[in-house]
Image: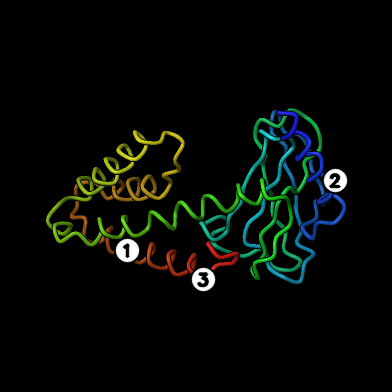
Amino acid sequence: MRKLALLLALSCSALGAASKLVITSQYQDGRDRVVQLRNDSEIAATAFLVGTSETAFATTDILLGARDGRLLKTGDTAEVRVTAAAGGDAQVLAVIFEDGTTEGNDTWIGRLMQPRREVYSQLPFALSLLHNENVNNFAASVVAAWFHQWRERWLAGDATRQMQLAEAAETYLRRAGSEKATRAARELTELFEELSAKLAGSKPQL
């Protein structure tokens, strides 16, 4: 715990002084800390992490759908809400830029990279479910159950594993209800193939 606290203190002091992702204002809203950021770098940011402590932080990954996929370009601003932030100023703890350069220590950069790696590793299996020859024969709710079973099976083996991809697919398919899964599966396939290509070409390399 002391080591984590020390790492946090070091990263806060370093980034607070030199980060190209600048906090322009922040205020307390109940238990949350609302933070306004501006990108002063010449390179667009693809992900960033803002926090007030080693347990109270918020991650924003544009490659995984945050900001509707809009990069935080030079001069762009963003708002971040850090939940359960019990007072204290927020700091920019980690940033990933489009060219692969980063700011922050390895611990915080790792917190940004791990969800990307998880999603990228899960995409092939998600696409295999959507390409199943029986998809067109079943209601979307039935195909949603395939993703639910996949998520439950993987979490049974490792309860800490992040399964946002399977959860998102399940939710999307359930919204289509009793209609044939064809349309929803086609839309998810297009989305997942686009995401796979985007992550494959992202920097730092996964």
Q: Which residue occupies 70% across, 35% down?
A: 54
In this view, the residue in front, 58 or 163, is: 163
- 170 above or below 116? above
Q: Quadrant of residue 38?
A: bottom right
- Mark closer to the chain start, 3 or 2: 2
Q: Which residue in the protein does label 1 denote?
A: 189
Question: Which residue type does callout 3 highlight?
Answer: Gly
Q: How many marks?
A: 3
Q: Which residue occupies 42% across, 68% down?
A: 194
In this view, the residue in front, 98 or 144, is: 98
2 or 1: mark nearer the eye? 2
Q: Which residue in the protein does label 2 denote?
A: 13
Decide: marks 3, 1 in contact (CB < 8 A)? no
Q: SS class of the residue under badge 2?
A: helix
Residue at mark 3 to residue at mark 2: CA–CA distance: 32 Å
Around disc 3, counting alpha carbons within 10 Å, would you say few (fewer than 14), some (14 to 19), or many (20 or more)? few
Residue at mark 2 to residue at mark 1: CA–CA distance: 43 Å
166 sits left or right of 89 in the view: left
103 sits left or right of 206 in the view: right
Q: Which residue occupies 40% across, 50% down?
A: 165
Question: Which residue type does callout 2 highlight?
Answer: Ser
Q: Which residue occupies 44% across, 40% down?
A: 161
Q: Quadrant of residue 124?
A: bottom left
- Coordinates of residue 151 in the picture (x, y in percent): 33, 41
Q: Which residue in the protein does label 3 denote?
A: 201
Around disc 1, counting alpha carbons within 10 Å, would you say few (fewer than 14), some (14 to 19), or many (20 or more)? many
3 or 1: mark nearer the eye? 3
Residue at mark 3 to residue at mark 1: CA–CA distance: 18 Å
- Colour scheme of the picture: rainbow
- Coordinates of residue 57 in the picture (x, y in percent): 67, 39
Question: Which mark identifies residue 12?
Answer: none
